Image: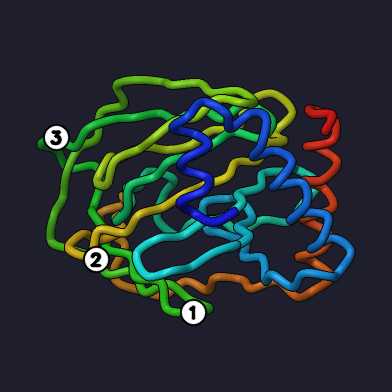
Amino acid sequence: MRYSDLQNEIDRGTAVSTIPAWAGSVLRAVADGTLRITAVRHPLGFFCLPVERSGELGVCLHLWSPQLTTSGSSTSQIHCHSWDLLSFVLYGQVSNVLGRIEDGTMHRIFEVTSLGDHDAIRATDRIVGYRPERLDRYGAGETYSLPVGAFHSTVIEGSGEAATVALGRMIRSRSDLSLGPPEVRSHTQRRHLCGDAESARAATVATAGLAAQYTY
């Protein structure tokens, strides 16, 4: 399945009967080495398996698990995307804490540009406050969306195990942004690209999580 196929399944309300099986086939192929996808340890604490990149459209499998070694952010977990997100939860519970920017002195806004194996994190002149306003929880088989520019953080509750199929539609005029301490300046952060063994390990963990949720 490609971006358009996955979106159509979600729009038609048939995602639960089709997307988990598709995701399982991708994960098993990565786990046994018949499909080579380089996983990325994302600074926001999950593994990303980039399945499709086509112009402004992208499809990734996002995997969270305490069984896997993850990376951390050099700013904070609060961020917004330069793309519209449509996400289908495969298993686990994904919670988004949404908030708004307001006048204040607690956070600096950083502009994040991904450049292969590292992120360029540019400190802007904007010092702001941030107010969490809403907690949205989503479980297996549910879909959520986040528009470009919506500041939020994501929490994986319970066991810490979760996976989603993330569909992104890039908006060229927008930037990825993150909040961080005012004293932090511009810097770079390495984005760890996994080798075949680590990518297969992440896929194996997610295959087990998916199998525990669905029979297909």
* Lateral position of residue 207 relative to residue 136, left or right: right
| Residue type pointed to by label 2 | Ala
Quadrant where the C terminus is found in the figure: top right
Q: Residue at x 54, y 56 (%)?
A: 2
Q: Is residue 191 left or right of residue 214?
A: left
Residue 181, given in percent of the width and then of the height, sits at 31, 52
The residue carrying mark 1 is 116
Name the residue rendered at 46%, 60% in the picture. 58
Q: Which residue is mark 3?
A: 102
Return the disc, 1 or 3, that comes first in the chain's sequence.
3
Classed neighbour count for the residue bearing mark 3: other residues with Cα under 10 Å, few (<14), some (14–19), many (≥20): few
Q: CA distance from mark 1 to mark 3?
A: 33 Å
Q: Identify the residue at image location x=60%, y=57%.
A: 48
Of the numbered discs 3 and 2, the one sitting upstream in the chain is: 3
Q: Distance of mark 2 from mark 1, alpha carbons?
A: 20 Å
Of residues 90 and 112, the one drawn nearer to the viewer in this rendering: 90
Kind of residue sitting beneath label 3:
Glu
* Disc 2 and disc 1 in contact, CB within 8 angstroms: no
Say which element carries label 1. loop
Residue 194, position in %: x, y? 70, 71
Residue flagged by tag 1: what amino acid is it? Gly
Q: Where residue 150 appears, x then y in whole percent?
A: 27, 40
The residue positioned farthest toward the right in the image shown: 32
Helix, strand or loop under label 3: strand
Q: Secondary structure at mark 2?
A: strand
Locate residue 128 relative to residue 209 in the image: left or right: left
Residue designated by label 2: 123
